Amino acid sequence: MTSNFYIVDVFAEQAYAGNPLAVVLGAEGFDDEVMQKLAAETNYSETTFVYSEQEKDGGYRTRLFTPAREIAFAGHPILGTAWVVRKAYARDNPGVIKLNLEVGQVPVTFEPEADGAEVLWFTAPAVKSGGTVDPARMASALGVSTADIDTRFPVQQMAAGTSAMIVPLRSLEALRRCRLDLAAYAGLAADGFPQLVYMFCSETRHSGNDLSARFFFEAHGVREDPATGNGAAFLAAYLVKHQVFDAQKRSWRIEQGDEVRRPSLVQLRVGESPAGIEIQVGGKVIAAVQGSLV
């Protein structure tokens, strides 16, 4: 059996930036063990498997694996997989590709920009706010001082399936100094707080962007993630809830991943729906490698 695969960079403004993703097509004959082994050998934060070029129930059946386990939902694999599916399977470059995941169907929208590039968007699951942490405890776990944390806003857990601690910082310099000390963080984890930590500040490296961010992904065996769609969705909900920076602002461009030399740009926008705020996460996708599995 031969299956095609792609390696793409998601949230990438240029080649070999953003968050890399492997997408395997024609995986209908693979069992769970084979998919898990391939994901472990690929060793990216996620590898996705698309069963067939034939749509079923209006979408393409897709499963998501980290090197360690299957997961139900993640942002950058959804965008990257939709890009590959449209390139490999869909006709006439449709504006929407629908992926059938274990959690349900997720539409991905392709929106052209003036320069001819496209930004892909998905709607994030509803985000809920959780408990808060004393800034001094979080500062200790991150190797910074309490003065580095912007205490106008809380250090707070945000969740949608997975969860992360959102940490507002005062400067880019403080953001760069952050290092997650697992021993110092053990007390927070024992209290039920997640080992995923998303830090941000309003100072940016590049003009035209709104925020800089870093994401420590220790709970999944990745010291730092170059870009995360779910983490960005958590941040969007946090920004709106606490009216950070500008109470009227409803879209942001987030720099992430510079510290791991994978500069990424995640885009966010927030609208209203009958259920409350609706968060959309977007970014560009660039192809890196195409090949076959035999």
Image: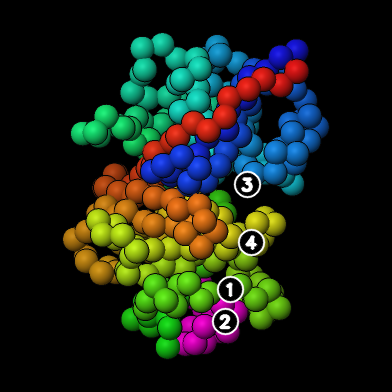
What residue lies at 61% left-to-right and 34% top-to-bottom?
22
Give the mark nearest the N terminus, 2 or 3: 3
In the image, taking residue 267 as reference, residue 65 lies left or right, namely right
* Mark drawn on residue 26: none
Task: Please name the amino acid that badge 3 sits on.
Answer: Ser
Is residue 176 magenta-colored? no
In the rendered image, the vertical position of residue 266 relative to residue 135, given as above or below: above
Q: Is 245 displayed left or right of 161 in the figure? A: left
For residue 28, which quarter of the picture?
top right
- Mark toward the start of the polypeptide (4 vs 3): 3
Q: Position of residue 76 (x, y in %)?
A: 50, 42
Residue type indicated by callout 2: Gly
Query: What is the number of the mark on residue 223?
Result: 4
Which numbered disc, 2 or 1, marks the residue that appears first in the sequence? 2
Who is closer to the viewer here, 30 or 259? 259
Kind of residue sitting beneath label 1: Arg
Residue 16, horizontal then vertical, whole percent? 50, 42
Magenta stretch encompasses residue 140: yes
Which stretch did the figure color magenta? 126-146
Residue 179: numbered disc:
1
- The residue positioned 31% from the left and 32% from the top of the image is 117
Q: Secondary structure at mark 1?
A: loop
Left or right position of 43 against 160:
right
Nearest the viewer among 50 and 284 is 284
